[in-house]
Image (cartoon, rainbow, N blue to C red):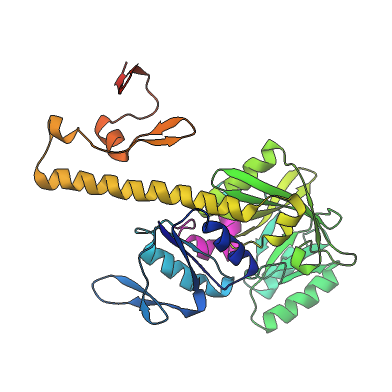
Amino acid sequence: MKSAVMSLGSKSSLMILEEMKKYFDAVDNIDLRDVEVNLGGAGKLNVLYQGNQLPQYSCIYARGSFRYATLLRSVTLALHRTSYMPIKPETFTIGHDKLLTHLALQHFSIPMPATYLASSTRAAKKILNEVTYPIVLKFPHGTGGKGVMFAESYAAASSMLDALFALNQPFLIQEYIETGGVDVRAIVIGDKVVASMKRKAVRGEMRANIHAGGTGQAVVLDEKTKRIAIDTAISIGADICAVDMLESPKGPVVIEANLSPGLQGITKATGINVADKIAKYLFEKSEIFSARDRDEATQKIFEDLGLSGEMATQIITNLDFRANRILLPKIATDISQFTGTEEVVVKVEKGKLVVEKV
């Protein structure tokens, strides 16, 4: 299988690319800055790289900053039906906008700090009169702790708001949770948290981000915190992401989800090769994605040939073993109409396996 990492060439992206070479037959490094989407006729989007048609890949892992969110969404929308891509098209819009992220969290009842959005100076200052200080002011876009400000009093917050409105800069007002400059980052891959660490801000700094000088230390999360991190990834539509949380008196609360997390800090802190875990996951999902395409192609052949009944149910295929379990082709489950909730009888003898509903 052939795969690609489409990114801005960060150290973390290159780490993942190198690990993917252990699993895929070929891995290409695609510079996101040389990618364009051609909105041609006939309702088709064409993705070009350095002016040429992008080749067909089994898997494309697209990463990039919020400045490229629109391009990333367009590329994923054009390619997600033919290549496995771990992040949904709309996720690049949601995940790179803190307001949309918090709306998704709220929809899934995921705990987060109290957050406010104001449309005018008057509305914002009314909120300032009702909140408890200090508070946090955030730009909707920005990563690595950039665009995050702290106000210790109404006077300080009011001055910040006047400047933000003068610059026509949107912002969020958020409850401040005292943690001593410590937050928690969890890397979610699929339905698992594969690595987690506590980040401690340097003295005089409230942001715990590694890129802002923070330090990381491995931590084992409890099941509730893991579940919150996994549900956050699900809520925004990401198979791979980092989830940042604070440990509040009421339990963990989510402050941000990062679609293109840095891996150096958490790899060093935990000793876990996160890049390898991402690469292995991409390979396994790509295999399933490719098998699905083969199953659908087989089904279409049956339909085109007008085959049905006994002949259509005789499928020649290889067995796919996963941890001593046999993974059946999708066409087999489609024809049998097993739902996974009913009881079945499994009849086994050498060279033969029969599964029947009770």
Image point 66% across, 52% down: which residue?
A: 273
Please, what is the dominant secondary structure of the magenta stretch?
helix
253 magenta-colored: no
353 vs 169, nearest the viewer: 353
> Could you say which quadrant of the image residue 224 lies in?
top right
> Could you say which quadrant of the image residue 17 lies in?
bottom right
Percent across and percent down for residue 328 are: 35, 35
88 magenta-colored: yes
Is residue 356 rendered to the left or right of residue 74?
Answer: left
Asked if residue 109 shows in the view, the reply is no
Is residue 107 rendered to the left or right of residue 213?
Answer: left
118 vs 26, nearest the viewer: 26
Percent across and percent down for residue 297 are: 24, 49
Percent across and percent down for residue 277 are: 59, 50
Asked if residue 206 shows in the view, the reply is yes
Image point 32% across, 29% down: which residue?
A: 338
Q: Which residues make up the magenta segment?
A: 85-105
